[in-house]
Amino acid sequence: MGRYSEVFRRSLADPEGFWGEAAKGIDWYHQPTVVLDASNPPFYRWFADGILNTCFNALDRHVRDGRGSQPALIPDSPVTGTCRSFTYQELLDEVARFAGVLRGLGVGAGDRVIIYLPMIPEAVVAMLACARIGAVHSVVFGGFAAHELAVRIDDAAPKVVVSASCGIEVSRIVEYKPILDSAIELAAHKPDRCVIVQRPQAAAALVAGRDLDWEQAMAGAEPADCVPVAATDPLYILYTSGTTAKPKGVVRDNGGHAVALRWSMEHIYDTGPGEVYWAASDVGWVVGHSYIVYAPLLAGCTTVLYEGKPVGTPDAGAFWRVIAEHRVKTLFTAPTAFRAIKKDDPAGELARQHDLSSFRYLFLAGERLDPETYRWAGDLLGVPVIDHWWQTETGWPIAANLMGLEPMPTKAGSPTVPVPGYDVRVVNTDGDEVAPGKTGEIVVRLPLPPGCLPSLWRDDERFVDSYLSRHPGFCITGDGGYRDSDGYLYVMGRIDDVINVAGHRLSTGEMEEVLASHPAVAECAVIGVNDELKGQIPRGFVVLKAGVRADPAALSTELVQLIRDQIGPVAALRRVDVVAGLPKTRSGKILRKTMRGIADGQDEPIPSTIEDPAVLSALRPVLADSG
Ligand code: COA
Ligand code: AMP
């Protein structure tokens, strides 16, 4: 038996022995004696009596063990033309001081703090400062609009919001503060205080009595020490798109998260103390939480925080420059980034202008890795290109080629095999396992391994309804796919209303709700269609209310803007067609899958349940027009 098979088998046969051993990679105030508390299924708790502090493990421990002068964080920002470096000692000092600021504002263990920041070091400092005092952070991605931020403020009910005057999108200044102000106005819950980072590119007007300037607050702050918390206490809430308009507040606990991420750095990413790890993502997404901030620091690595794009900051050689300059060993990004680079520099000439000798691994996730991009990247770079599959709910990979355990031959289109701890099955609608090669729903048998969501924020019922009730004893992933006869997994895409646009997870249901709120719209549909660069992009279709007269072009522009204003630019809905009707089943269900198939140029069969085939015939040319 190979090493992978042996370790995988043991992780499922003896999860307590397996994870109990992995827990030794973490410093505990009280070493857990209960590895898995399974007394209240389907709610499982890892390391139930363990006591630790995640920030201590990410910073203090390394300083204690002699890594104080090693770079911990390298914020590299081509959009501002700056590059900085914080050693472990320097980062610890900043974090302890900001923890003191938060404490001075009345934030204690269990209180929530919303972080709405661009890719600046203060984002990392604020996250770790929350962890230090046992507060629960909830980072909101900067590309979301005020309404989305308000929804999250209302759900998390933060005491404090940390934000900045602006973000920078290539060369466009995006003022964050007006977005924050209107979100607070829209929200029913009002945070007590806001701490604002004033960036030189834009000054934010501060609200007297509520807003504090980050620098001034830091100047007078007393450093705060780590607070011991229970392994099962929440570390953060990260909202993610579900099938309805209301985002799901995925909860991450402290103990399981620390143990799983530490294990993953060694066994999946093969990257250890002193080595440089770069996740080119955003702290607002789960990849940013796990692999920009927590995992590399838990492992004693140097992590790169990149404020820029793969192209345009200044060109398609940006990633190669960062790898060469900071001696990056491991890069993790989304396939879209590589498609963007390939589009601008198809022959990869810019890569050859840099010394990439430190570079060992390219990990890709966030969306399906198309075989062409996989081959292009592998040929150009000559390093293993590892497709791995995971989601916000799990916080770390479900399937991967485990570089630190037993590298396996790769197969284009497959994220290889289930990671130890994940009992992955492919089932039909009745929950029965399907044969190799047959497509079905991908589910994971309970208990999920450490690090995965224990529940949704203050909503156990929704957690059970959304993930656990469809196939009792299993957690659904929302993805469909199959396994081949060698056990390799193929993840073919979402089977719900979630789409992946440039690696960003979005809900078509939420976009439909926004379109339907327009007074001229009687009904609508939003579908994700294939896109060469972004993998998928949304397209909207609306039917007008009887008697409404509107110029289709003007209405379309208005609806595109409405989505931008309500959800944010990240939704990337650029086209809405005004159509005479939407194809439906006889029971009134819109045939979105059929629409998607036609828009993607597939030979889509007309379902026998269709109510009026003429409606679909009339829509066909609009769907087929990809311009
Ligand atoms: N703050 C404010 N606005 C933001 C933002 C942020 N943090 N992030 C994105 N936006 C805006 C962009 O400016 C853009 O606005 P526009 O419509 O006015 O141009 C819109 O949201 C869409 O952004 P994005 O999806 O990034 O598309 P893009 O066209 O700007 O760039 C790529 C395309 C491929 C270069 C880019 O998507 C990319 O780098 N993808 C890498 C994938 C990635 O990081 N995924 C994260 C998960 S691993
Ligand atoms: P997020 O929660 O934003 O990380 O998005 C998770 C979703 O992205 C998954 O449910 C998949 O649909 C998709 N995804 C992530 N990684 C992969 C991958 N390697 N292959 C295919 N789809 C992926």
Image: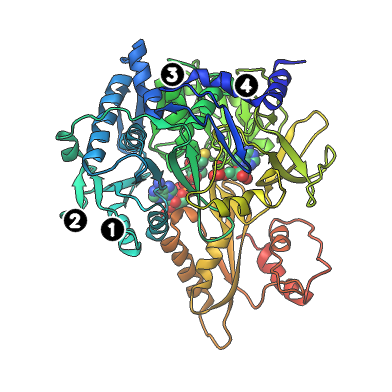
- Image coordinates of residue 220 in percent, x first then y, are 14, 35
Q: Residue furthest top?
A: 66
Which kind of residue does numbered mark 4 sit on? Phe
Q: Residue at x 73, y 62 (%)?
A: 594
Separation of residues labelled 2 and 4 (CA atoms): 52 Å
The mark nearer the N terminus, 2 or 3, is: 2
Query: Can residue 319 be seen by looking at this rendering?
Result: no
Is the residue indicated by label 4 positioned so its CB lies within 8 Å of ligand 2?
no
Q: Is residue 230 left or right of residue 394?
A: left
Q: Nearer the viewer, mark 3 or mark 4?
A: 4
Separation of residues labelled 3 and 4 (CA atoms): 34 Å
- Please tell me how many numbered marks the rendered image carries: 4
Q: Is residue 422 left or right of residue 585?
A: left
Q: Which residue is mark 4?
A: 18
Q: Based on the displayed image, in which of its 4 quarters is residue 540 positioned?
A: bottom right
- Which circle marks residue 207 in the picture? 2
Q: Which residue is mark 1?
A: 181
